[in-house]
Amino acid sequence: MSSILEAIAEDPGLYLMDLQGDDLRLQTMTREAFHRSIFLDERIVHGGRQGFRAPLDAVLDGYAGPPPAERPIALIFHVAQCGSTLLARALDLPGRDLVLREPAALRSLGVMARLESAEGADALGPRLRRLLPFVLSVLGKHWPDEASVVVKANVPVNFIAREILDLEPHAAAILLHFPLDSYVAAVMRTEGHERWVDTIFRELRLDSSPWAAASPPRDTAERAACLWFAQMKAFEPLPAEFSNVRSLSAGAFFDSPAETIAAAAGLFGIELEQGEAMHIASGELFATYSKNPALDYDPEVREAREAEARSRLASQIGEARTWALAARDRHGLCESLGSPLVGEAVPLLG
């Protein structure tokens, strides 16, 4: 067990896949396998390498890795369908940084925290207070020639963003988001996307959240509005309370990709060569679909798709706005998120 504990604590090639019941799922990886894996959940590309399990409590009892503040990670928090995969891949530069896209173990903690909140408990109960520093410490491992680790999280992780930053107060983080109208157009543009909204709403028990108590969402458009509003309330205080947190409108990223890449790299401590940000933004990555490079997908395709979705979903967007405006009147909401990474802060509700 001691050799496994040492590898979990120190070996960047031993990846914490997920937490399942009383076990940890671990996966052996190469540096190239991390780069090839667009996502690090069940879609991971490990090349058939060995995976195994270890007893969770025994690992927690014996873990001797550094606390998160001594092994900091940079974070991309995001609301989904807003370019986070594209930004994370643009910053993935082997030999300079290690980018982890959607680690399932961290997502699991976000879901667990929401379920505890729905039951009336603190967001982090005793077990989560033990698990979160461990998971962050393990995710912070990297190869010696790489200066930083960047974690692109999942939607459930937004609900423990404060708890993560409390453990790493100087961590650099980006809050990538859409204003409401663009968000609804993005997350309801197909039936599959609508199913995602309904599924994540149920999974996170947002019907039991304070934001939904006075006006329970009646359909997918209102559930999308509630999901967006809950995430904005989670993001709202962070730029003022943590010095290295920056907000980023998805529109600003799409309009100025090279400037955004350069600013994000600077925030995350990733060294870029002269003109490298522009080279990345004008390259193949930005001409294909970030989640599936086999598909062509450039700014013109994205803009046409968004315009079509906004036109077709005009009534649903209006319904979502009505719900969100009422929620703002009840609970308050800032006009825009502070400390923009690039450009001007964008009004959240127009």
Image (cartoon, grey):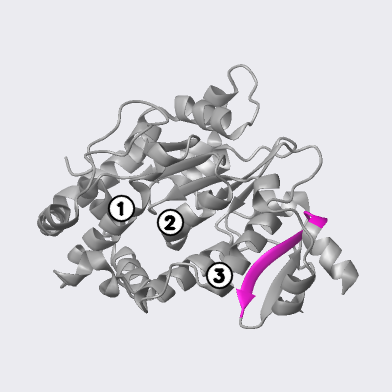
Identify the amino acid type marked 2: Asn
Q: Nearer the viewer, residue 243 or 48?
A: 243
Query: Mark 3 = which residue?
Result: 128
Residue shown at 19%/50% (left/top)? 332
Q: Which quarter of the figure is the N terminus placed in?
A: bottom right
**In this view, which residue lies farthest toward the right?**
3
Residue shown at 73%/69% (left/top)? 26
Circle 3 packing at 10 Å, graded few (<14), some (14-19), many (20+), is some
Identify the amino acid type marked 3: Leu
Residue shown at 44%/67% (left/top)? 123
User: Which mark is on residue 233?
Assistant: 1
Residue 126 percent location from the top left of the image: 55, 73
| C-alpha span from label 2 to label 3 | 15 Å
Query: Mark 2 = which residue?
Result: 158
The local secondary structure at tag 1 comes to helix
Q: Position of 247 compared to 171: left or right?
A: left
Please say whether residue 160 is visible from this viewpoint: yes
Q: Do labels 2 and 3 touch, CB within 8 Å? A: no
Q: Earlier in the sequence, mark 1 or mark 2?
A: 2
| C-alpha span from label 1 to label 2 | 10 Å
Residue 22 percent location from the top left of the image: 66, 83
**In this view, which residue lies farthest toward the bottom?**
22
Circle 2 packing at 10 Å, graded few (<14), some (14-19), many (20+), is many
Q: Position of 106 compared to 123: left or right?
A: right
- Image: 237 above or below 216: above
Q: What residue range appears in magenta?
A: 10-20
The local secondary structure at tag 2 comes to helix
Residue 137 percent location from the top left of the image: 68, 56
Identify the amino acid type marked 1: Lys
